[in-house]
Amino acid sequence: MKVISTVAELRSTIGDLRRQGRTIGLVPTMGALHAGHLSLIEKARTDCDIVVTSIFVNPTQFNNPEDLRTYPRTVEADCASLEKSGVDFAFIPTVEEMYPEPDTRQFNLGPVAEVMEGPMRPGHFNGVAQVVSKLFSFVNPHKAYFGEKDYQQIAVIRRMVEIEGFDIEIVACPIVREPDGLAMSSRNVRLTPDQRAIAPSIHRVLIQSLEQARGQSVAEVESFVTRAINSIDGLEVEYFTIVDSLSMQPLTQWADAKSGTAVGCVTVYCGEVRLIDNITYAL
Ligand code: PAF
C-alpha cells in the first residue's frame, strides 16, 4: 500500500491508472477504522481493480468544535488495517492540503438535507458535500462506497453527485454490527463500560418495532421507539423519524412511501456520545 498525502500526487497516480483502463473504487473515511469500514473496502476490492481509501477528519462537517476535538484519531493503527485489507492507496492529507483556502461553496442539497440531521447539525451536510466533492474530483473513481449507518448522508451524497454531474456510482453498504447488535461506529470507543452495556438496546428496540409496524400507524411506531429507548436509564432520544427510503421525507402513513420502503432513523445520546442507527421497514 502506498500512502499519498498531496492532491497532485493523488491526481496523477490515479489518473494514470484510470487511463490504463483500471477501475477505481474510493472509500472515504475519517479514520478510526472498524469492521464497518473494512466491509466497504472488501466490497470495493471485489468490484474494482484499484482501491483508494482516504483518511481525513473533515473540519467543515463538524458543527460542534468539541466533537471535532475529541474525534478519535488512530492513523498508525488505521494504516496497518488498510495494508492488511489490501488497499492500494491511502490518501491522508492535512487540513491545509484539502483546504488551501476556505471552501465557501454552498450546495443546494434540497429536501433530503432539510430533515433529521439537517436541522440538528446545521452546516454538517454542506461540509460533507464539500469534502466528498473534493475527493471525487481528485480521485475520479468509478465507484464510491458509503455505509448505511449514515443513511441520510448517502441520500445527500447522491444529490451532490447529481448537482455536480459526477459520473460516479454510489454504492451503499449494510450496517455492520457488534455481536450484541450495536452499530459499529468510530464514536463507540468513547462509551464508558456502563454506556457500552446499554447502547445495544437501541438496536433491540428498533428490531421490536418491526413487529409493531405490522399493525400500527407510523406515529404509533415512532412513539413506541422513542418511549422504549427513553425508558432505559442513560439513553435519550434526540429524534426517531420514519422516512421514505429515497426522498428522506417523513411519512405520516406507510402508504405514502413512494419508494416502497420506509426507514426509521434514530439519534440517541448515550451520555455525551451521539449514536445513530436505523431500521428498514419493507412495506
Ligand atoms: O461518513 C464519514 O465518515 C464522513 O462523513 C465522510 C463521508 C468520510 C466525509 O468526511
Image (spheres, rainbow, N blue to C red):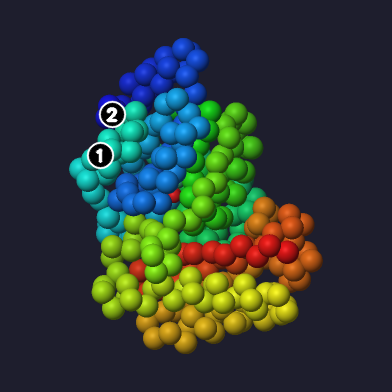
The quadrant in which the N terminus is found is top left
Q: Quadrant of the C terminus?
A: bottom right
Please say if 237 is above or below 75. below
Q: Is residue 4 above or below residue 230?
A: above
Q: Residue at x 28, y 65 (%)?
A: 190
Q: Is residue 202 visible in the rendered structure shown here?
A: yes
Say which amino acid is labelled 1.
Cys
Please give the count of numbered marks on the rendered protein: 2
- Please tell me which residue is depicted at 55% across the width and 72% down the height of the picture: 207
* Residue 136 coordinates in the image, percent (x, y): 48, 32
Judging depth in this view, the residue of 38 and 228 nearest the camera is 38
Q: Of the numbered discs in the image, which one, if any, rests on residue 1?
A: 2
- In the picture, measured across the screen, residue 79 lies left or right of residue 238, that is left
Question: Which amino acid, by three-letter code, is at mark 2?
Answer: Met
Q: CA distance from mark 1 to mark 2?
A: 9 Å
Residue 228 at x, y percent in the picture: 52, 83
Residue closest to the far top:
20
The residue closer to the viewer here, 193 or 242, is 193
Judge whether 37 appears above or below 218 on screen. Answer: above
According to the picture, the residue beneath numbered tag 1 turns out to be: 79
CA neighbours of label 1 inside 10 A, class few (<14), some (14 to 19), many (20+): many
Q: Residue 194, percent across and down?
A: 28, 78
Can you tell which quarter of the image residue 163 is in?
Answer: top right
Residues at circles 1 and 2 in contact by the CB criterion of under 8 Å = yes
* Residue that lies at the very extreme toward the left in this rendered image: 76
Tell me what residue is drawn at x 49 percent, y 23 percent. Answer: 23
Name the secondary structure under disc 2: loop
| Horizontal side, residue 261 vs residue 227: left or right | right
> Element under label 1?
helix
